[in-house]
Image: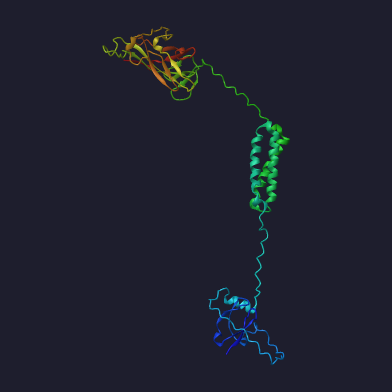
Amino acid sequence: MPFVARCPFCSKEFRAADTMEGRSVTCKQCGDAFTLAKAEKLPASSVAKAQPPAPSIVPVSKPPEAVQPIEFDPTPLPRTRSLPALAEALEGPSETPKPAPPPKAAGSRRSWADELPIFGVASLALLGVALLLLSFPSLRFATIGVAGLAILAGLIGWFAANGGRKRMWMPLAGAVLSIPVLVVAIFFPQLLAVRPPEEVKLPVEDPAKILAVPFRGTAIDATSEWIDASRYSIQQGDLRVRVLSVVIGPVELSSKTASRSQQPYLQIKLEIANARVRKRLDYLPWSRGDGIVLRDQTGKTYALKSLGGEVAGQQKNSVALGPFDRVTDLLIFESPPAKTVEHLRLELPASAAGGIGSLKFEIPPLMIQRH
């Protein structure tokens, strides 16, 4: 038996066969899909409250209108609405209050210092420039301007920090340290005057001064004209001379015919050294005999002998001595009489090594050896 079904969305009534009850159909008026059910089985919320039917007079001559049959559409229904959406459409939308956003914490707003941290850096950078300019008295006004800018940048950065302690120290340090620079540049410019350094007067060394240098110890001024050759070397300027040995005996030769001289001679072996690093010394051998004097306690002089180029250890040519270089030379004199010498005095011209005057050694008898 046919029954009347009502669309729950647009309330359009349709007549359907009993076999259609419980099936889903599409309303041709609103286009929504719903399940066929008898009007008396619909929920109370979706069916209008029953009103007592008004009495109607149907003319006998006019047959009752036929209810329009529902055309069934076998096409699968689109899944446009889920069960919760259909329930919302039948019962109406539920109004659930949305949770209010959490309130912002106080002070969470970004401060100027976060956006412009350059003020603290700029203050310290300007402070460095001001300190550099402070060392130039002619740039005094530039120093004042740069120091003022450093203080201004520091104050701006301090206020911009908005109470953040961690971000206040940099601009505050730049401003505070720039204040003394500004004060000095404005009120005490005389402190910036650069005075020329006082001329240091180095003591002028006497080129002819003679020093007695002990073999172990510090050089001292010569207190005597003649220096004891057994205890001291003689130094004048860069030149230092020492008597290494004094021997009376045959001379060692380097010739192929003889290894020693037949006649004994007085042999004095010297060491010549460049004692400093200031310059090079050119030594002209004393063995050439220029200006050398040897005498004993009686005043008797002994002549310098030349045995040719066959003497071992004797310098014949000029020698260049660099800093702390040294060389040995051998002087040969005629032999003094036996057991008559108490001491010998040797006088060497300092001009052989660029010096002035003479180097005077006194040779005690303990240094004289006889072979």
Going by the image, does 186 lie left or right of 83?
right
Q: Residue 323 appears in which quarter of the rendering? A: top left
Identified at 68% across, 49% down, the residue is 158
Q: Residue furthest bottom?
A: 60
Q: In this picture, is 318 found above or below 121? A: above
Q: Is residue 328 visible?
A: yes
Total number of numbered labels?
0
Q: Residue 109 appears in which quarter of the rendering? A: bottom right
Going by the image, does 153 lie left or right of 220?
right
Q: Which residue lies furthest to the left in this view?
A: 257
Image coordinates of residue 284 in percent, x first then y, are 42, 13
Q: Which colour scheme is used?
A: rainbow
Which residue is at the front of the view, 29 or 63? 63
Q: In this picture, is 261 found above or below 27? A: above
Which residue is at the front of the view, 58 or 38? 58
Quadrant in which the N terminus is drawn: bottom right
Image coordinates of residue 16 in percent, x first then y, are 58, 85
Image coordinates of residue 78 in percent, x first then y, are 55, 74
Quadrant in which the C terminus is drawn: top left
Q: In this picture, is 44 found above or below 258? A: below
Which residue is at the front of the view, 2 or 144? 2
Image coordinates of residue 188 in percent, x first then y, are 72, 34
Q: In this picture, is 290 found above or below 217? A: above
Going by the image, does 214 lie left or right of 150?
left
Q: Residue 125 appears in which quarter of the rendering? A: top right
Q: Can residue 366 be seen in this view?
A: no
Q: Residue furthest right?
A: 187
